[in-house]
Amino acid sequence: MVLKVGILRLTCFALVFIVLLCLNAPFDVVCYCWPRDLGWVRLGCVNLKLYIVEVDGVGGLGAKPYNSCLTTEGALNAAGTVSAFYSGRPNNGIWWMDYIDGGVLHYQLNVTVEASVIRDWQSYREIVEEGKNVIVLNSHGQIIPVPRGYSPEEWVDRIADAMLNRNVTWVHTAWYPFSAYHIEGESEHHLWGGEGFRHLMKHIGIQNATCTPPGSESVLISLNPSAQGSFGDSWPSIQGYAAYVQAGRPLNASQFKEFIVSSPIWGTMDAYLTGGIIKFARNFNASGSFGFYVHIGTNETFNVSEKPTGGDYWRGYVGAAAAIWANALRIMGEEKIREASTAIKEAKAEGRTKGLDESIRLLNETLEELYEKHLYVAAIIDAVKAKEAAENAVQPSLIEKYGGQIMTTAILCITIAMTWLWRRRNNKREQRYA
């Protein structure tokens, strides 16, 4: 009798476990909600170096000769006023808004730019030959200064090497890129046509790259809405003084489509880009060392009323702003990826696996956005979410962790108990009728 009662108790205990498991009795539950608080997300700080090349005696050349000093002034002002925010918003940085259910979340990235004007040939040579993680803005427009001892082709190869292997950004500021060169020690520049640009772009696998417009070079092209939302908000004067540009010498979007960062500056993704940021890498999805080529192919800029605003200045301003934006967000995106990866590793080491799948999913999306789609704002947002999801992950409850084993054991106990009872009952029947 005592044995029978014990088996019945064991059976009841097993049944209770199965019921609890099926009903998901109160365990620790991760509720991942983003964001927890609406307001500002402070991302941290990025330090950049900008070198503005204005070599003595070279001058500037766009659709016509121009004063490169104004281009230099524009670039310096863009670097110095990275955070030209509207009244009441934080200074010293790049910011954007993320519209979500329930309100608007503002992201803010502090940026410090150390800007220098390079006027001597030796410094210019050293920056291209040895510089790492720097922005080089060529204020001379179409003209490429070539140091003594190099042929034009060899110097273009040096520039390409700097972008490919040392994270250097090259900013072109007027008309057709690399279409003229000025050799150190000579008094005049030499025209080069489209050969210089074709030679440069061969390094990233683009053959026969050209900057010829499909129609009139003087037709007005508007600031791309996505560009306005990306870095235009951090440099508001761009929207007022460079709202339109002449088509000038644009990039053919079909040749560069996989390499376009975020969106064109002026133009559209499916046509021609009078202004744009190009990821300069051997493969469009490269995740190691790569740089950027910033293209400003216009000659004149216009305000919202389509009145000229002085293109020499604003070309330098927009070119510097685009380069600063791309580099700052790339650096911060990679930093946030490292932080999210570390948070995931720590959660795994501590056994906090419940809720971790969401973090891993977001991290994978971040890697794709940063290195394949070149959507830097989206990448940073998802990386921040991935880190928070990992930090909020918890250890699974006992039944969540060992639910399968518990259910198997419970079913086994019930089976044994029922089998024992069935056999006992059959034995009693046999003894009764024997």
Image (tube, helix red, strand yellow):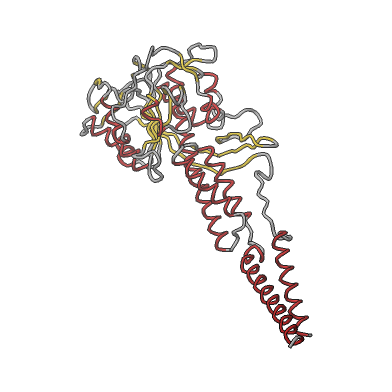
Q: Is residue 42 left or right of residue 219?
A: right
Quadrant containing the N terminus is bottom right
x, y percentage for residue 193? 26, 21
Q: Which of the two residues, 267 or 26, is positioned nearer the viewer here?
A: 26
Q: Quadrant of residue 404?
A: bottom right
Pick the front one: 61 or 352: 352
Residue 68 visible in the current orientation: no
Looking at the image, residue 97 lies above or below residue 389: above
State which quadrant residue 166 falls in.
top left
- On the picture, is 39 further left or further right than 247? right
Q: How many marks?
A: 0
Q: Image quadrant of residue 423? A: bottom right
Indicate the position of residue 141 as horizontal and vertical percent values. 35, 23
x%, y% of residue 345?
Answer: 53, 58
The structure residue drawn at horizontal position 75% and vertical position 81%, both measured from the top left corner, is 6
Q: Identify the residue at horizontal 46%, vertical 37% (top origin).
A: 374
Front-most of 56 and 220?
Answer: 220
Work out which residue is located at the far front of the displayed protein and give it: 434
Relative to 15, say whether 426 is above or below: below
Q: Is residue 27 visible?
A: yes
Quarter of the figure that contains the C terminus:
bottom right
Q: Residue 154 or 147: which is nearer the viewer?
A: 154
Residue 119 pos. (x, y %):
34, 29
Residue found at x 53% / y 37%: 377
